[in-house]
Image: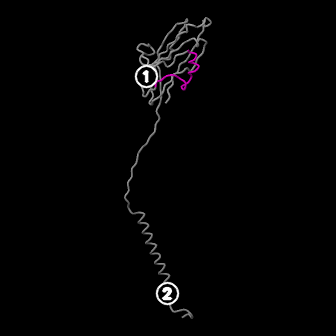
Amino acid sequence: MVAGRAPGRGLGSATSRFRLATVAALIGLVLHGLFTWAGTSAMFTAKTLNPTNAWATGAVSITDDDGGVAMFNATGLVPGVTGSHCITVSYGGTVTSAVKLYASASAGSLAPYINLTVNEGTGGSYASCTGFTPVGGADYAGTLSYFTAAKTAFGNGVGTWAPTSNGQTRTYQFIYTLDSATPSAMQNAATTATFQWEAQA
């Protein structure tokens, strides 16, 4: 026996600590089990989805029936002489578009004396204006010089056609007249112009 120490006190303390440790371990195991069960236990679920969303672009496309040949090659003109020609433009796009006509090139001194009217309509073709029927008023009526100077891009071009699907067509009738007041100084004068259609969506 050790002097000053109660019999069995050291052993009792060790046993108490062991018991406390054992209880703590058991409590830990129980809590761990509860958390594990809570994390893996089955639940009611439901889902819905909106599958395979997609985006794709459309396209605009226009062609004409001139076969690469100019509408006019008029020579020997005198004041007051007039002439006309038609051309059919076809739409091959997949989206609604606006189509405008403008001049992409011009040259020569005779343009101020050539009066030009452009009508938009149906029927007729590059081969002949037979059957052409105007739609609305004239797209343009004025001098060739003003047209080639002021109508030079889609933004200031003329026309009301707005095709909505592939295969639609519109015929344009061009009528020119050499002004009856054309001065004698314009003998042997000439001018050229390139007409262009553009579709935008």
Q: Which residue position holds label 2?
A: 12
Residue at x 46% of width, y 39% of height: 55
Question: Looking at the picture, which amino acid does disc 1 mark?
Answer: Thr
- How far across and down, in percent of the image, does residue 186 sit? 61, 7
Q: Nearer the viewer, residue 201 or 20?
A: 201
Question: Which element type, helix, strand or loop, lies under badge 2?
Answer: helix
Of 170 and 120, which appears nearest the observer? 120
Q: Nearer the viewer, residue 184 or 127?
A: 184
Question: Which of the two discs, 2 and 1, labels the residue nearer the N terminus?
Answer: 2
Q: Residues within 10 Å of mark 1 (few under 14, many from 20)?
A: some
Q: Which amino acid type is marked by label 2?
A: Gly
**Which residue is at the far right?**
185
**Residue 109 — which label?**
none
Q: Is residue 154 magenta?
A: yes
Q: Is residue 117 above or below residue 76?
A: below
Q: How is the image coloured?
A: one colour
- Please report the residue visible at 60 percent of the width from the left and 9 percent of the height from the top: 189
Question: What stretch of residues is rendered in magenta?
Answer: 143-161
Q: Is residue 45 magenta?
A: no
Q: Is residue 4 above or below residue 116?
A: below
70 left or right, relative to 109: left
Disc 2/disc 1 C-alpha distance (Å):
108 Å
Image quarter hosting the N terminus: bottom right
Q: Residues within 10 Å of mark 2 (few under 14, many from 20)?
A: few
For disc 1, the marked residue is 169
